[in-house]
Amino acid sequence: GYSGQIRDINDPWVLNLASKYYELDGTVDSLLKKVAPIPVDMILAQSIEESGWGTSRFALKGRALFGQRVFNEEAHGFIPYDREEGLEFKVQGFDSLRHSIETYALNLNRHRAYDEMRDRRGQLIADYKPVSGLDLMPHLQAYSTERGKYIRNILKLIKVNKLRDFNDAELETHRELTIRYDQSSRSMIEQFAQLDNQ
């Protein structure tokens, strides 16, 4: 592992990435744990569940695939018709589907509520095992107020629809799906860490 401090790496690119992932005071290892793949089967299943297979008002009008909530009154979003009285949140709207996916991925990769999920993912990566939503979903209790029921629904969606088949999907350009993660970012961080340790 790389135990070096991020602040000891004098590269603006690394420092910017560390800032984005709330790891400026962390180590190279703690940053690498966040700059890692979110499996495609999990992304697909959660977007299916949250957007009603892409048919929800939030998906159609706001390109919102994951039901992310915002609490800022000025934020772009939609008030759910069934929102309980006294609650102030909106479902966040986006200018593109890509932005919706990027925000979802960043949320899972840096919010403290998902530390357990990232620990499990890091363990799988360290053991050279494939990362699947079937492994990670049990650690996403905090994602939905429905907790166990939500996780069971996502796991069922993955299994019934054979979504694991998409985990190694490639785009027509033969580049790995960019919603997983940028392998070059990970490699660059490791290179900086090796230089720093010499």
Image: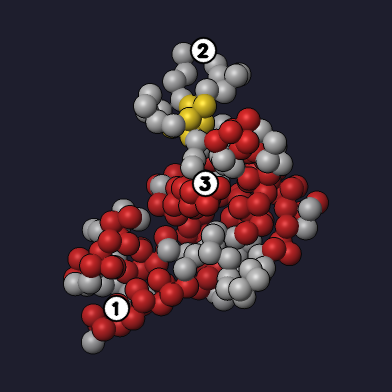
Residue at point 63%, 68% (across, down): 171
Q: Give residue 166's position: percent from left, percent from top.
A: 69, 63
Cα–Cα span, label 1 and label 2: 51 Å
Would you say residue 73 is visible in this rendering?
yes
Name the residue tied to disc 2.
Answer: 85
Q: Secondary structure at mark 1?
A: helix
| CA neighbours of label 3 inside 10 A, class few (<14), some (14 to 19), many (20+) | few
Q: Amino acid at mark 3?
A: Ser
Report helix, strand or loop for mark 3: loop
Q: Residue at x 41, y 72 (%)?
A: 186
The earlier-in-sequence mark between 3 and 2 is 2
Residue 190, position as x, y percentages in the image: 36, 77
Q: In the image, which disc is placed on residue 192? A: 1
Q: Earlier in the sequence, mark 1 or mark 3?
A: 3
Does residue 149 appear in the picture of this structure? Answer: no
Image coords of residue 115 (percent x, y) = 44, 52
